[in-house]
Image (cartoon, rainbow, N blue to C red):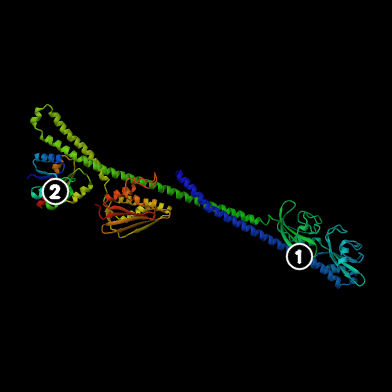
């Protein structure tokens, strides 16, 4: 493939790849972006629901335990609760379903224990002055923040005040931090998920899974969390991007925090992206390969087509030259043969008429006789030359084949149908199946059809139309080649069959094609005519006699 | 009986020379320079010619037309076409019109005489049949 076709192949390949791969990649990117956006929305909604659910669970946990203590304070008298062994029974009943109460105590208005049941022997402790005690005495119900207390162990208490006729007393219970922490941590998701509670001051009320201990200060200010349940993106102290759900616990001024590494839920998305990329690469390779392969095939075929066309044109021109040469040879031979015959006969007559007495009278008799014979000898030599010339001319003369014109037209059409298909030119065959078989020169007829079809292809625009029609009349067969091309300007009509006249650019046409066709058709005893309207098209009509003259 | 011959050719030197040379060989021969003169001679001298040597390219009536008319008026006469034009087309048409042979100039006299003899024999055989 030479440079011109190589360049064409490159251009077509680049265009082909662009129009196939760009939409493919754009579609792939759009699908990924849509999927990513949907995925993020879904993760956000999931985390929001989880936070809502866990905050409700925490509130329910606190409300249940508070209600249990309140109910106990109302249904049981102080005497009954402080009677020996009673609190032990009560603690057993409270923990029957869930071991969430560590201990329970009855405390009088001075902060002294009236009764205590639990593992820590706190009967002698006085809670007067403690924050939770003061708050409970003041508000009736109190859930404390987590604090170390007398034992130096983080815990929190729920206390309810009961107002008796004599004096108020408090029912106080310590909540199992582990049970509560497990409840909160059930909101942890995945390998890096974190769920914990901080109070308004930013201290951990449950131990976080990572990044701190209970009662340590959280690395963010809880006031950034808006009221209600919210999901936000934020960075932790290590610069990791977190998707965090904040949920305020309404009954206690606590903030439930559920963190998720934003890259962790994106893992399936990354996997999807990897799969999509692999699919896109495979699809691109397949599409690209197909485009490259087919365009190379197309351009190779086009190059072969062009080569074959150039070869056909060269063959046509060569044949035309030979036909012209044959005619010239025949003309020259004829012009020479007549005087040569006269010379030969004149010399022969001289030889016949030589008088022996004349020969005896001259010393040049031998020379005279020799010259007469030599004249005849040279006539013979020249005759051989002219007869060879006539032999050559005869080989150029039309043959007399039995021809089905439709077959010749179909053969000529097969030569051009690939180029027509490439240029999207419609080739219409209106061939009369009842054409008579005629006597003519098949090869020369094919040259004419091929030339007319090539001219029509050059004349029509992209997606044009060429109609080849055959019919018969009483004189013979008529074939027309009609195109809807540019037409032939009227001022050129007289010159169209002139040798070397062409409207094509330099190097594109010899200007011999139609001249040769015209000459061939005359030689076959037929005719070649045309009608043309500029801008509408041209119809060439080939008329062939039934029997060649 | 010696062959009676009519030579038709517009080339004067050729016509005169060949007529004389054939005469020298004992044949009865007459020369004319055109197709119409040949027809006139044949019509004016019926049954006096066995073979016609006929050129093709002649001014006025050409050789092929002359041949057609000779065959129409004197079918017993054999015609040998002798021309400088070696076209197969002329050869084919000549034979179709009934020419005995088609010879291309220049041609040696002995070959011409041979063909004249053959044409004479063929003509006589045809007449006898």
What chain is tagged by disc 2? B
Residue A275 shown left or right of residue A78 in the figure: left
Give the residue number, with chain letter if any, for mark 2: B36
Which residue appears farthest toward the top when viewing the image? A363
Give the residue number, with chain letter if any, for mark 1: A57
Residue A251 shown left or right of residue A474 in the figure: right
Which residue appears farthest toward the left when viewing the image? B1
Residue B48 picture location, percent across and down: 8, 48
Foreground: A384 or A527? A527
Mark 2 vs mark 1, foreground winner is 2
In the image, is residue A250 above or below residue A465?
below
Residue A227 picture location, percent across and down: 76, 62
Q: Which residue is drawn at 43% across and 47% down?
A: A303
Local SS, label 2? helix
Which quadrant of the view contains residue A474? bottom left
What chain is tagged by disc 1? A
The answer to whether the residues at label 2 and label 1 have Cβ atoms under 8 Å apart is no
Q: How crowded is mark 2: few (under 14 residues within 10 Å), some or many (20 or more)?
A: some
Residue B41 picture location, percent across and down: 10, 48
Residue A202 shown left or right of residue A266 in the figure: right
Q: For the residues marked 2 and 1, what is the alpha-carbon distance in whole angstroms?
A: 137 Å
Q: Residue at x 76, y 57 (%)?
A: A224
Which quadrant of the view contains residue A140? bottom right
The quarter of the image holding the N terminus of chain B is: top left
Q: Which residue is drawn at 12% across and 26% down?
A: A363
């Amino acid at each position: 493939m030479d440079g011109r076709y190589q360049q064409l192949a490159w251009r077509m390949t680049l265009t082909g790849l662009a129009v196939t791969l760009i939409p493919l990649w754009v579609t792939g990117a759009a699908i990924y972006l849509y999927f990513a956006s949907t995925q993020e929305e879904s993760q956000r909604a999931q985390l929001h629901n989880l936070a809502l659910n866990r905050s409700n669970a925490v509130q329910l946990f606190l409300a249940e335990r508070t209600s249990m203590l309140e109910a106990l304070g109302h249904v049981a008298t102080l005497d009954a609760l402080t009677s020996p062994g009673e609190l032990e029974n009560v603690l057993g009943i409270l923990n029957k379903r869930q071991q969430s109460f560590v201990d329970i105590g009855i405390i009088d208005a001075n902060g002294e224990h009236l009764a205590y049941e639990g593992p820590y022997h706190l009967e002698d402790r006085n809670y007067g002055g403690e924050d939770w005690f003061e708050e409970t005495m003041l508000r009736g119900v109190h859930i404390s923040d987590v604090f170390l207390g007398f034992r130096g162990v983080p815990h929190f208490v729920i206390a309810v005040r009961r107002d008796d006729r004599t004096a108020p007393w408090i029912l106080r219970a310590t909540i199992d931090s582990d049970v509560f922490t497990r409840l909160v941590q059930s909101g942890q998701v995945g390998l890096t998920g974190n769920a914990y509670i901080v109070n308004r001051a930013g201290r951990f009320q449950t131990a976080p899974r990572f990044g701190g201990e209970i009662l340590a200060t959280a690395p963010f200010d809880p006031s950034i969390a808006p009221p209600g349940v919210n999901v936000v993106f934020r960075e932790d102290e290590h610069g990791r991007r977190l998707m965090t759900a904040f949920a305020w616990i309404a009954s206690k001024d606590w903030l439930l925090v559920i963190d998720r590494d934003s890259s962790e839920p994106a893992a399936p998305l990354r996997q999807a992206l990897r799969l999509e990329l692999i699919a896109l690469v495979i699809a691109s390779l397949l599409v690209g390969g197909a485009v490259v392969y087919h365009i190379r095939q197309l351009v190779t075929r086009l190059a072969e087509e062009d080569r074959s066309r150039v070869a056909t044109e060269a063959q046509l021109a060569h044949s035309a030259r030979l036909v012209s040469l044959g005619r010239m040879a025949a003309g020259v031979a004829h012009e020479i043969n007549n005087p040569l015959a006269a010379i030969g006969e004149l010399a022969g007559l001289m030889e016949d008429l030589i008088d022996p007495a004349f020969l005896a009278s001259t010393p040049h008799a031998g020379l005279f006789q020799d010259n007469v014979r030599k004249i005849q000898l040279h006539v013979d030599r020249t005759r051989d030359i002219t007869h060879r010339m006539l032999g050559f001319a005869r080989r150029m003369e039309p043959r007399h084949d039995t021809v089905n014109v439709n077959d010749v037209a179909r053969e000529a059409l097969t030569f051009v149908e690939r180029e027509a298909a490439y240029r999207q030119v419609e080739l219409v065959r209106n061939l009369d199946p009842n054409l008579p078989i005629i006597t003519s020169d098949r090869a020369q007829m094919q040259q004419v059809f091929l030339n007319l079809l090539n001219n029509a292809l050059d004349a029509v625009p992209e997606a044009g139309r060429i109609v080849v029609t055959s019919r018969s009349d009483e004189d013979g067969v008529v074939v027309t080649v009609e195109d809807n091309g540019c037409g032939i300007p009227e001022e050129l009509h007289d010159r169209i069959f002139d040798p070397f006249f062409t409207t094509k650019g330099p190097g594109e046409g010899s200007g011999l094609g139609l001249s040769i066709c015209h000459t061939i058709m005359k030689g076959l005893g037929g005719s070649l005519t045309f009608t043309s309207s500029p801008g509408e098209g041209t119809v060439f009509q080939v008329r062939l006699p039934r029997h060649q003259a | 009986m010696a062959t009676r011959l009519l030579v038709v050719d517009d080339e004067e030197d050729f016509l005169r020379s060949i007529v004389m040379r054939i005469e020298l060989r004992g044949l009865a021969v007459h020369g004319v320079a055109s197709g119409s003169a040949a027809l006139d001679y044949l019509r004016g001298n019926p049954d006096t010619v066995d073979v016609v040597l006929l050129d093709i390219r002649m001014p006025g009536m050409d050789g092929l037309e002359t041949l057609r008319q000779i065959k129409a008026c004197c079918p017993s006469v054999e015609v040998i076409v002798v021309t400088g034009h070696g076209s197969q087309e002329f050869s084919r048409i000549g034979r179709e019109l009934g020419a005995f042979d088609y010879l291309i100039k220049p041609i040696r006299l002995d070959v011409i005489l041979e063909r004249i003899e053959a044409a004479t024999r063929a003509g006589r055989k045809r007449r006898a049949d």
